[in-house]
Image (cartoon, rainbow, N blue to C red):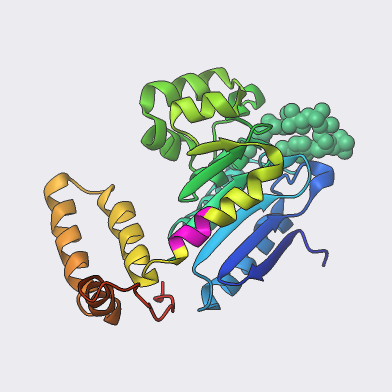
């Protein structure tokens, strides 16, 4: 089987590359299956503290595979949507932060994949959009759910109803991406951000991710209860003693970096 998803390790950074540039990394059944398998492997790697996701060639991902979707019936369409959403949710709930390094087109399922990541860094060349309504379908890999949560319902509705493709700067103004950088700097900026995260307690970063993601699904009172519980859990970890001792002793903390399990 050809490697439609490549993955490598650079120190404590895992880098996943969607590698099907001839079709602009369109997400067909095989690409999705290999991404699913790749997430299995990443989950087993205790030595990865941050993951970067990017695309080979001029696209990040140009969406779900339109040619593959053309003959589907309603049942098959539903199954495809549920499968893509399940895989993206796995990425979203990995214990380590996931940074999308968006090198080019992030359309339809591509924008939905980027939104399942924790942080989005975009090249000046990147383009974003949910063009599905022009194909007679709705966004199907949780775009109707994550886009309004991320940029608010009014802006999300405008993007989804018009199917408009926007540039990286406009995506930044909408809050869809964190930063826009020159194309040649994209991976260095993403890796620099990963290194800044990796200096901290991996346990505390993973718990922060959980508190933010799970808390956003709750009312504020329940979310504060969840935060208090997670905050308390930090005090079980040697990282809390080390981090605070280092402060008191006026030295740098030396965390024993090992990732907590999902
Ligand atoms: N599915 C299947 N093939 C795709 C594809 C897709 N989403 N996007 C690009 N390709 C293929 C093209 O068919 C072409 O292959 P052939 O040479 O064999 O025809 C190849 O990739 C290169 O693409 P283009 O020649 O079109 O490249 P371009 O630079 O002229 O245009 C583009 C780039 C504007 C991104 C254009 O390819 C495009 O509009 N792609 C489709 C974008 C889209 O509508 N995405 C949403 C898909 S639906 C979805 O994602 C549903 C969901 O929510 C789950």
User: Relative to 199, is 261 above or below?
Assistant: below
The residue nearer to you, when weighing 46 against 135, is: 46
Q: Residue at x 82, y 67 (%)?
A: 1
Is 149 on the left-hand or right-hand side of 242?
right
Quadrant of the picture in which ligand 1 is shown? top right
Most common secondary structure along the magenta stretch? helix
Q: Would residue 11 be seen by someone viewing this image from the given angle?
A: yes
The residue nearer to you, when weighing 79 against 27, is: 27
Residue 109 pos. (x, y %): 60, 41
Q: Would residue 71 be seen by someone viewing this image from the given angle?
A: no
Is 55 on the left-hand or right-hand side of 262?
right
The residue nearer to you, when weighing 14 against 190, is: 190
Is 208 on the left-hand or right-hand side of 259?
left
Q: Quadrant of residue 121?
A: top right
Q: Quadrant of residue 103?
A: top right
Find the magenta span and give its range. Answer: 193-197
Residue 52 pos. (x, y %): 58, 57
Residue 87 pos. (x, y %): 54, 57
Residue 254 pos. (x, y %): 38, 78
Q: Let me know if residue 211 is in the magenta part.
A: no
Q: Quadrant of the C terminus?
A: bottom left
Q: Quadrant of residue 127?
A: top right
């Amino acid at each position: 089987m050809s490697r439609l998803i490549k993955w490598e390790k650079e120190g404590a950074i895992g880098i996943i590359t969607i590698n099907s540039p001839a079709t602009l990394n369109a997400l067909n059944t095989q690409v999705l299956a290999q991404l699913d398998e790749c997430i299995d492997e990443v989950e087993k790697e205790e030595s990865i503290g941050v993951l970067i996701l990017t695309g080979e060639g001029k696209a990040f991902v140009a969406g779900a595979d339109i040619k593959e979707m053309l003959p589907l019936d309603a049942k098959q369409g539903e199954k495809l949507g549920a499968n893509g959403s399940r895989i993206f949710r796995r990425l979203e709930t990995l214990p380590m932060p996931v940074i999308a390094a968006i090198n080019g087109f992030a359309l339809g399922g591509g924008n939905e994949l980027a939104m399942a990541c924790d942080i989005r860094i975009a090249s000046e060349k990147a383009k974003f959009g949910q063009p599905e309504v022009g194909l007679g379908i709705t966004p199907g890999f949780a775009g109707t759910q994550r886009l309004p949560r991320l940029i608010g319902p009014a802006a999300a509705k405008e993007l989804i109803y018009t199917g408009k493709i926007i540039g990286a700067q406009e995506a930044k103004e909408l809050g869809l991406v964190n930063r826009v950088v020159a194309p040649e700097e994209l991976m260095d900026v993403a890796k620099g951000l990963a290194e800044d995260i990796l200096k901290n307690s991996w346990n505390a970063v993973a718990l922060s991710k959980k508190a933010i993601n799970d808390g956003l699904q709750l009312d504020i009172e329940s979310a504060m209860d969840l935060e208090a519980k997670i905050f308390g859990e930090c005090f079980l970890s040697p990282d809390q003693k080390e981090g605070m001792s280092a402060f008191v002793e006026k030295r740098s903390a030396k965390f024993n970096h090992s990732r907590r399990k999902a």
